[in-house]
Amino acid sequence: MRIVLGVGGGIAAYKAALLLRLFSEDGHEVTVVPTEAALRFVGAPTWEALSGRSVQTDVWSNITDVPHVRIGQEADLVVVAPTTADLLAKATHGLAGDLLTNVLLTARCPVVLAPAMHTEMWEHAATRANVATLRQRGVTVIDPDSGRLTGADTGPGRLPEPEDIRAAAMAAVAGAPSRAHAQEGDLVGRSVLVSTGGTREPLDPVRYLGNRSSGKQGLAVAEAAAARGARVTLVAANLELPVAPGIDVVPVQTALELQAEMAARAADHDVVVMVAAVADFRPADYARAKIKKSHDPADPDAAPTIELVRNPDILAGLVSGRGDATTPLLVGFAAETGDATGSVLAHGRDKLARKGCDLLVVNEVGEGVTFGADDTTVHVLTRGSDETVDIGPASKRLVSDGIWDVVAGSLRPRRQRVLD
Ligand code: CTP
């Protein structure tokens, strides 16, 4: 996820350094946007060293990058810790005098504010009114902890511990409606099964045939569905990324394990999205002991020949398993490079016809493109239609929202209960 960590000018700014650490260790990309006042408490070198990125407080540097608009637009989550009384007031009234307040105006992602101030300021009618307005607009304003404040005094106003702010932020991401459907929750009542990651086909106890899939795209698809209100199960092949709370994770390793889990669960879901990169082949034999370099006593320099067998096509199996039923809606992903025999889209259309799924999301892959990257471009193809919906380049999360826009449009309306 792309997280913007805003830091306000309060003594608790030092705790934001620990929060930054937590986010980075969870694998997020963090851009720190301190206010000028925050830098009086903790200087720019600390933020730059911990985030690995330069920081700026005003809107006048790096003008060609248009940071006052871009940083907010591209964020998947904005967290401001500590949020001072002054920042709360500015956020409420839409003031935009520095970079952080500009980010707050341009962000369309979940925004989480962690206030910290003296008890009198927190309890003042002005602050109470600002907090109420922000909450009404969908901003998460975390209640401060009670305890020892800057001086000898105690009371409500302490910045919560970094772990608690992280938990509140992740809950906001998992529970937030997506930005395109801010209030709709258009997948509420739907259940979604997503596969992600890349399968590993063991050769011996220490080796496997694998692929370069990071699992980020499938994770983004799952989290976007959860944010729109769906119940989500993620069948995760060798996924090493943290998953938002609220999503059920079923870990698997091999294509056969993935097939078994998908086949057993598909019929209970409204939508199945196969994002996982499934190995098409696996070693025909699994060697129970490590294959030694000199494995053939007759020819110590010989390299072994590894025989492969085909793995099942899981998506095609789900299509045939569905038979004449109309659910689940089946969505495939196609990683294509394009070659002499056809373009990326031409291969995509062929694949959609071959697999027989309802929708196919085609993305372009290759050296340095998409695998492990955060930004991607996809084209969504629908069976029985010549139309192509192009989404991106954008973060995998935003692209996932675009995919759900298309999928939600293809879902049959749920049966209404007749009340009279
Ligand atoms: N897929 C699957 N089972 C496989 C291979 C792929 O279910 N054994 C699914 C993927 O999860 C994806 C879609 O099929 O949703 C397309 O995957 P891709 O690797 O692009 O297609 P392949 O069928 O392997 O076709 P090709 O190798 O010809 O590109």
Image (spheres, rainbow, N blue to C red):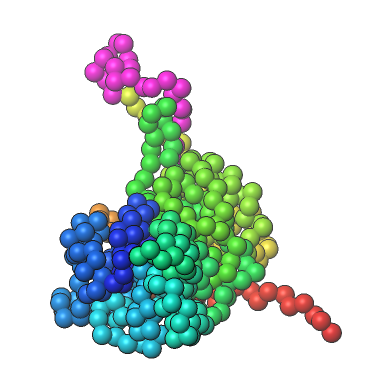
Name the image quarter holding residue 330. Answer: bottom right
Image quarter in which the C terminus is found: bottom right
Residue at figure coordinates x 47%, y 78% from the top left: 123
The residue segment tinted magenta is: 281-303
Residue 417 image point, x, y percent: 77, 77
Q: In the displayed orientation, state which residue is furthest to the front.
A: 152
- Horizontal side of residue 116 vs 410, given as left or right: left
Residue 100 image point, x, y percent: 29, 76
Residue 206 image point, x, y percent: 38, 28
- Horizontal side of residue 342 vs 250, given as left or right: left
Residue at figure coordinates x 34%, y 48% from the top left: 212
Q: Name the residue nearer the viewer: 51 or 179.
A: 51
Q: Is residue 289 magenta?
A: yes
Q: Name the residue nearer the viewer: 409 or 82.
A: 82
Residue at figure coordinates x 68%, y 62% from the top left: 324
**Image height of 50 relative to 300, above or below:** below
Evaluate whether residue 344 shows in this view.
no
Q: In the displayed orientation, state which residue is furthest to the top.
A: 298
Residue 204 image point, x, y percent: 41, 27
Q: Name the residue nearer the viewer: 196 or 14.
A: 14
